[in-house]
Amino acid sequence: MPTTTYKTPGVYIQEIPAFPSSAVAVETAVPVFIGYTETAVWAGKSLVNKPTKVSSFAEYVEQFGGAFRSKFTIADPDPKTPSETFLVNGAPKTVTLNKDNVAYLFNSIRLFYANGGGDCYILSVGTYSGKDTFTIQASDFIGSTDNPVSVFSILEKEFEPTMVVMPDIIALGKDAYAVYTQALMHCDTVQSRVSIFDVRAQGLTEKMDDVILEFRTDIGTNFLNYGAAYYPWLKTSIVQPSEVDFRNLDASVDLTKLLPETNAQTIATNFKAANKTDDVSATNYHNSLTAASPTYVAIIKEVRSKLNELPPSGAMAGIYTLVDNSRGVWKAPANVSLSLVDAPTLNISAPEQEGLNVDVMAGKSINVIRPFPGIGTLVWGARTLEGNSQDYRYINVRRTLIMIEQSLKLATRTYVFEPNDANTWVTVKGMMVNFLSNLWKQGALAGAVPEQAFDVQIGLGATMTPNDILDGIMRVTIKLAIVHPAEFIELTFQQQQQQS
């Protein structure tokens, strides 16, 4: 410490720090959801393209509103096109979502909180309040010549988010994958977050292998260890029966002709003649049709079933948060059941999962969500898209390393412009060793003793040359033995001779 020059007689007190500064683990489970919202206003100011932190679903609704009311058309099936049908008065009908009538973000947020979600950021790229239709566009996410603003350039200024989730963009089908490549590049740039991806829904006439090959081809080969993909989509129960009524039917659907029950036809005719649009009249009309027409109930049930088919990324963000908070970021977010999920849209068997989990050609692993009788719907995969890498094969290893990197990076900022000498080196090393020792005790690092779990090297002759010191560079080398999940468990049985 510098010597103090005393000029006035008296007693002086000096407090000398006894302990080195400590490193604190950064938050690991803070997703940023990017997509379209009903509104985006708070305190009279627009929240469009402004990352906004919320801590609960109620807070989300307060600032960003509710769900988009999607419209469906009911028609006779086309004999040339395979489709899912249901019976109306004995005749097969199809329920088809209208064009430009889909928005997944709101229900994905609900699924996130149902599966253990907590704090998250919302980045609204547009609103649909008062609109009957709206178009999801890739340019709203990655920018265009007319609007060069990219959501990823906005997120570069935000430190806290650790996951990127974009459920709305998958409505574009394979065109969403171009946005995914930008998300991977963004994650590599900031080095503090990963992306959770959806694979587009499989059509009735498509093979699963073709859908997966399309994804693997279009996702590219760059920065794959910063992303994880999940498949298939989920049949959820997020949308409740009370949230769906006749207003989810297209104007072309004439209930006076479609419903076979006489009482229902009378109710529909009278309501049509009254031409009332207020909520009370609509509720009464819906309740009357529900009581008078089993056919109407079946139609609404089919519409609700369609609305409840959601991409899995929102649920997975919740699972990541749940596992991080209960076990730690080093625990693989797998072999965990999903809440408010009835089943995946596809029942993928163990042999079918082999080609998804292990991609011999490029290592682009797809994590499968599978149903197990008597157990529930479980997450049955924990790989990044770089599934052939020994370094970053597992998503928990990638995320654990991010947590350690960012925690020590923030803690080491204190020593920028400090003297680059042995005193500083000892202090920095002590801080890092204490932090890593605590992680080892919690089970994040593998080893019987701390020396086997990690190693921190710093100093002249060890990590630095005299030229490094002249150039103002302090180099620290940290080696870690991060725990890996037991993905494959082999039980070996052999008979032995009777002993007695």
Image: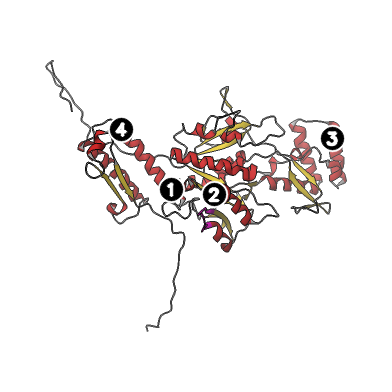
Query: Which image quarter holds the C terminus?
Result: bottom left
Q: Main secondary structure of the magenta part?
A: loop
Q: Label 3's element? A: helix
Say whether disc 2 or disc 1 marks the residue closer to the N-terminus. 2
Residue 317: x and y in percent read 52, 44
Residue 176: x and y in percent read 60, 42
Mark 4 or 3, closer to the camera: 4
Farthest residue, direction top: 8
Residue 398 - label: 1
- Asked whether the residues under the numbered discs 2 and 3 touch, taking CB atoms below 8 Å apart as contact, a structural biologist would say no
Say whether disc 1 or disc 4 marks the residue closer to the N-terminus. 1
Dot 3 corresponds to which residue?
272
Dot 2 corresponds to which residue?
229
Residue 76: x and y in percent read 82, 49
Residues at marks 3 and 1, CA–CA distance in whole angstroms: 58 Å
Q: Is residue 266 left or right of residue 160?
A: right
Farthest residue, direction left: 9
Residue 276 - label: none
Q: Is residue 285 visible?
A: yes
Dot 4 corresponds to which residue?
414
Residue 332 covered by magenta stretch: no
Residues at marks 2 and 1, CA–CA distance in whole angstroms: 14 Å
Q: Is residue 144 left or right of residue 424?
A: right
- Asked whether the residues under the numbered discs 4 and 2 touch, taking CB atoms below 8 Å apart as contact, a structural biologist would say no
Residue 363 covered by magenta stretch: yes
Question: Over which residues does the magenta segment extend?
Answer: 357-366
